[in-house]
Amino acid sequence: MPAPLIEMRGISKSFGAVVANEAVDLSVAPGEILGLLGENGAGKTTLMNVLFGAYAPDAGEILVQGRPVTINSSADALAAGIGMVHQHFHLAPRLSVLENLLIGIPGKSGRIDRAGGLARLREIGRQHGLTLDPDLPVSALSIGEQQRLEIVKALFRGARLLILDEPTAVLAPTEVDGLFSALRSMAAQGLGIIFISHKLNEVRALTHRCVVLRHGRVTGRVDTPASTTSSDMARLMCGHEIVPPARGPSTPGAPVLILDGISTSRHSGMALRDVSLSVRAGEILGIAGVSGNGQRALAEVISGVLAPDAGRMTIAGKMVSRFSPRGVQALGLGRIPEDRMTTGVVTNLPLADSMVLPRIGTAAFSRNGLLRPDAIRAFAEAQIKAYDIRCPGPMTRAGALSGGNLQKALLARELAFDPKVLIVSQPTRGLDIGAARFIHEKFLDMRARGCGIIVIGEDLEELLMLCDRIAVMYEGRIVGTLDSAAATVARLGLMMTGAEGHG
Amino acid sequence: MSVVLEQIFQVGFLAAIIRIATPLAFATLGEMFSERAGVLNLGIEGIMLLSAMTGFTATSLSGSLWLGVLAAVLTGALMGAVHALFTVALGLSQHVCGIGVTLFSSGLAYFLYRLIFGQQSVPPSIKSFETLPIPVLSDIPVLGPAVFNQFSLVYMAMAAVPLAAFVLYRTPWGLSVRMVGENPRAADSAGVSVIATRFQAVILGGALMGLAGAFLSMVQFNAFTFGLVSGRGWVAIALVVFGRWDPWRSAGAALLFAFVDALQLRMQASGLGHIPYEAFLMLPFIFTIVAMAVMSRNAVAPSALLKPFRREER
Ligand SMILES: Nc1ncnc2c1ncn2[C@@H]1O[C@H](COP(=O)(O)OP(=O)(O)OP(=O)(O)O)[C@@H](O)[C@H]1O
Ligand SMILES: [Mg+2]
């Protein structure tokens, strides 16, 4: 085995009372793809931020090619040949691709070295199949392209170790294939790669070796990921078996949500074109499709944020006449938005406030125009307990919660009011298997209690497991709906490219 | 109104526009650099006043005009550094600190002025810069004498606009400034020091504000008075928005404002005397408000404006 490219020894890091990393040892060899696994909040991102110089460790040392180095800033990390693609991209949307690439790169005779940048960009693109249009503003790039830019940025700076923090959470299945082939090509050239993901089948397909973190400590190592089963890995991560929930047969009732010929215009993304669908009580309908094909507009119409130009929508037998979030909510709709941080909670307010926000004007939480802080707190406390939301308490800043816990909080907030229809987007994006299972079980519970659920997602395996029927969206239309018994990943994948299906 | 139209295309009128626009251009460019890096500098009004005072004093005591300009620039840079210390290094509220800088600088300017010059019945004045005709160019009819027979500080302002655009858009440092104003985390993870870049931008901005102050006390009025700046700093803040944080557009905004201001001065003087002169005085400000209301609708501020950067926060 070759000498390690990077070695971390005894790394510890705490945030106040929270111990995020404790005595972690980890090493990566040249050409090796190392998987870093662990539940939400296990400390993966923190550990990588220490390696990348964003956080200062409380204890421990870092060795680059056998020599101890001090990494106090990202500049130090870059100089040591370490590059990182963060969970949330570090790009300036209004600047161009090339400008985002050349930030921090010394110029040529006082000016930005445009020609040199373009040449390197082309070269990297050719080597690993990572091509980008240099003059587009980053805001015009798809998420997959933005990620490509982040990778190119790291390679541009001569990274010999590339850290990717949950790179696949934001990608469509086809984009994942492209990413993996680029990563394999880099590893073949001797780069070391640290790959973080909650999707164990990806980890098994890509990585050469895995390290498992739990509560900030290394609790397991997997030397042959390809021949280790997902459930074994899951056990290492969570400390117990994870059994996939079984979706029993259901007896759907009357339709609780009907969309009839809905079309929209004036939408920043893809608009809807003549969309009709229905969800019955006790049924889970999946909406599959490559993101950007109208899913956001669909979610916005159903949750009352966007009024359609044409078509009708009925919730629990009542026609929606005025589209507003409060109006559809009063008819019995619950909603868990796609982006937890921006449209789900108010990150700077206490968690309790975000948990009652959609219903803050109701008698339960306010009286005579004044809030009832005790009632709000009590509600939040009860939900925190019922859903095992890990946080110091209801008054914690919502933004400080980990992704999984935030998602649980949003779920608790909607389910507490017994919605007749629930619409969720990407319900388990970024969640560990344990948390994902928990969410799935809750959905199946709701289904058994007669709630109609719409799940918008890109993870076809998840949809197949969860849904009774799956509709596929392409370019703002529903191109077909399949019974999930008849659906396969291959067939759905084909329909997602626009091929007609049979309902 | 024909009287007014006649006046517009006169040498004197064009020269007046240029002269009014010069301090505004310096101030606007200064504020723009600061805001492009993500730091609103409400200290501008006070920084201009204090620099005007130190510039005037240095010249008055030494007899050298350029020494005065240097003093004003250094004063501006120093006050920029003070603002950066509070808002960038300590991450305090940019609004509160900016207003604090304005109050402090204004108070200090009055205090020092009184301390040095005492209470005199005739305010002391200096011999101002003289105009510097540029050969050939100043012979162009109308435009020549108005634009190319000006003070050296005016030429500096003219050069400052393309220079600012070059620095902002073509140099690595300018890119860093724009990046820390849009997404400081991105700059940080690319190895750029957010704190240092913001400090530099705010200090450069302060120095430009100092030039604006120097122009007022050493070219426009040849004296220091307490009402010297009279809101030009606040106008510059509006002009930055109007100019969408771009050097060329900001300078254009300054010219437009100067045009309206020069126009109202002419109108005051040109026999429309039955209207109280205060009505004319309002004109440029009404223009600013209307222009802001119209333009700022689709103007997008630097994303990280007003947001302090702390590395370990998420
Ligand atoms: N900047 C911070 N300030 C305070 N606490 C933090 C900070 N960053 C992380 N933590 C805490 O440290 C712990 C580890 O968080 P970290 O983000 O490293 O987990 P993770 O393994 O990346 O989880 P996920 O899979 O959800 O991304 C969590 O309890 C988290 O709340
Ligand atoms: Mg993480």
Image: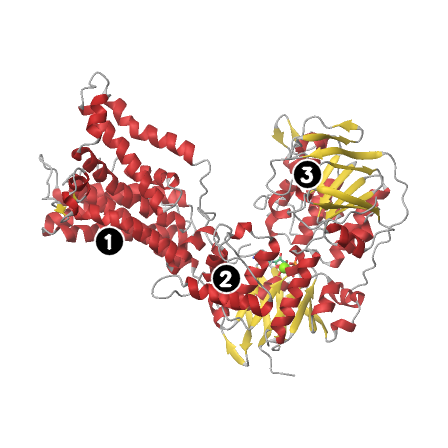
Q: Is residue B80 visible?
A: no
Question: Dot 3: what SS?
Answer: loop
Q: CA distance from mark 2 to mark 3?
A: 39 Å
The CA distance from mark 1 to mark 2 is 32 Å
Q: Which residue corresponds to mark 3?
A: A272
The answer to whether marks 2 and 3 mark residues whose Cβ atoms lie closer than 8 Å is no
Report the residue at 8% width, 35% height from top: B122
Asked if labels 3 and 1 touch by Cβ distance under 8 angstroms, the answer is no
Q: Which residue is mark 2?
A: B189
Question: CA separation, marks 1 and 3?
Answer: 59 Å
Residue on which disc 1 sits: B74
Nearer to us of marks 1 and 2 is 2
| Whether marks 1 and 3 lie on the same chain | no
Amino acid found under the numbered disc labelled 2: Ser
Residue at 80% in and 31% down: A316
Which mark's residue is nearer the viewer, 1 or 3?
A: 3
For the residue carrying disc 3, how many other residues have a C-alpha within 10 Å: few (<14), some (14-19), or many (20+)?
Answer: many
Colouring used for the render: secondary structure
**In this rendering, is residue B260 above or below A103?**
above
Q: Is residue A263 left or right of residue A58?
A: right
* 1 or 2: tag closer to the N-terminus: 1
The chain carrying label 2 is B
Residue A83's spot in the image, x, y percent?
54, 67
Neighbours of disc 2 within 10 Å: few (<14), some (14-19), many (20+): many
How crowded pointer 1 is (Cα within 10 Å; few <14, some 14-19, many 20+) is rated as many
Question: In what element is the residue under mark 2?
Answer: helix
The quarter of the rendered structure image containing the C terminus of chain A is top right
Amino acid type at image mark 1: Leu
> Farthest residue toward the top?
B274
Looking at the rendered structure, whether the residues under marks 2 and 3 are on a common chain is answered as: no
